[in-house]
Each structure stands twice: as structure tokens, then as C-alpha cells.
Amino acid sequence: MTPAQRSGATARPTTRVAFAIPARRTTSLDRIGGRSYRVHTGDSLWAIARRTLGPRASAADIARTVHVLWRLNANRIASGTPDLIAVGTELRLPN
């Protein structure tokens, strides 16, 4: 029994809050590499293609890569449209 409990005082309940330190967040400027990429909030095939190619890619290059991404991942993108990709979807990236 604590001294406060012995004296009859009512103790406030203690609330403990745990904060998780988030993993490093990606930004629209981070380059994507590797064989696959997990879709994050706010991603689009255009943004993923642009980040795959790097900052000097032309709009035509990005458009071609979007088409390749769609061909590689049409069966993984449950919406059936390249304009709507779900967060958490694991996409194959072109080589």
C-alpha cells in the first residue's frame, strides 16, 4: 500500500503511453531499386515509375515505365485499373 492510499487520498490512475519510432519514411524524391516495391499511402504507378528511373527521366520514359509496371503487376493490382493501387500491394519492378 502506498502512503497516499494509507492516508485515504484517491490516487489518479497512471496511464502509460508507448510511442513506436516509425521506420524511415520514403519521400517522393527517394530512388527505388530492387526487384519489388511495397505500395505506400499516396503512391501511384506514375510516382513509382518516376522514382525507379530517377530525377532526369523524361515524361515519355516515365509513361513507358508505367505501362511496363502495369503489364508486370496487373494480376496483383486488385482494382483492375492502374489508377487505383492498394497500400501494401507488393509490385514487381522492371529490371
Image (cartoon, rainbow, N blue to C red):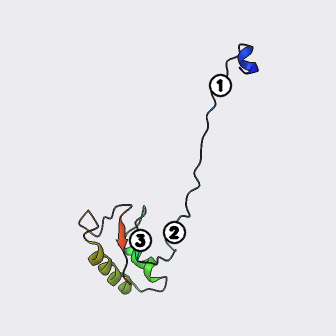
Rendered image quadrant of residue 5: top right
Q: Position of residue 21 (x, y in %)?
A: 59, 55
Q: Residue at x 38, y 84 (%)?
A: 95
Q: Position of residue 24 (x, y in %)?
A: 56, 64
| Left or right: where 57 falls relative to 6 | left
Residue in the foreground of this view, choosing between 87 and 20: 20
Q: How many numbered discs sit on the rendered protein?
A: 3
Q: Amino acid at mark 3?
A: Tyr
Earlier residue among tags 1 and 2: 1
Q: Amino acid at mark 2?
A: Thr
Q: Distance from label 1 to label 2 (Cα)?
A: 43 Å
Disc ID at residue 12: 1
Q: Residue at x 53, y 64 (%)?
A: 25
Q: Which residue is mark 2?
A: 27
Q: Position of residue 36 (x, y in %)?
A: 40, 73
Earlier residue among tags 3 and 1: 1
